[in-house]
Amino acid sequence: MSVILLRVNNIRPIIVVTKFTNEYLNNIDKDLMCGFQELIAPIADCCELLDFNNENYVFENDDFMDTDHLSISGARKTSIILTERFGK
């Protein structure tokens, strides 16, 4: 319902999936990924999906606290990319 309210007010929601390490991506449960896709499918047409794992942004090991959580440097890098892509 929240997505509908945003669209009524001419606001396009953005779903952001932050970068994971290659180790995480290579070992992630495929059912989990399918479940995520099923979860967002009903709203996919009215939202923009930015999955950093499907983009060519370069992240280093220092950009992660662990396999699927960004460190401060990774969060800053992500924020810069989002600002460049979508503005302030």
Image (cartoon, rainbow, N blue to C red):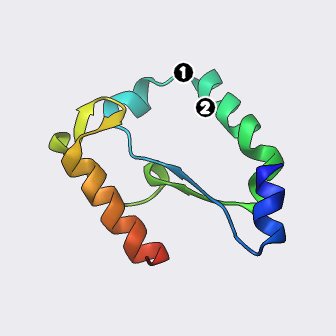
> Which residue is drawn at the image coordinates 44% and 48% (left, top)?
53
Q: Which residue is mark 1?
A: 29
**Label 2 secondary element:** helix
Coordinates of residue 3 in the picture (x, y in percent): 77, 55
42 left or right, relative to 83: right
Which quadrant is home to the C terminus?
bottom left
Other-residue count near label 2 (Cα within 10 Å), few / some / many at <14 / 14–19 / ≥20: few
29 lies above or below 12: above
Q: Find out whether the residues at labels 2 and 1 contact each other: C-beta distance under 8 Å.
A: yes
Query: Residue lying furthest left in this view?
Result: 62
- Image quadrant in which you'd find residue 71: top left
Q: Amino acid at mark 1?
A: Asp
According to the picture, the residue beneath numbered tag 2 turns out to be: 33
Residue 29: x, y in percent?
54, 21
Can residue 58 be seen at all in this image of the molecule? no
Out of 82 and 60, give the one closest to the viewer.
82
Residue neighbourhood size for the residue with mark 1, other residues' Cα within 10 Å, grouped as few (<14), some (14–19), many (≥20): few
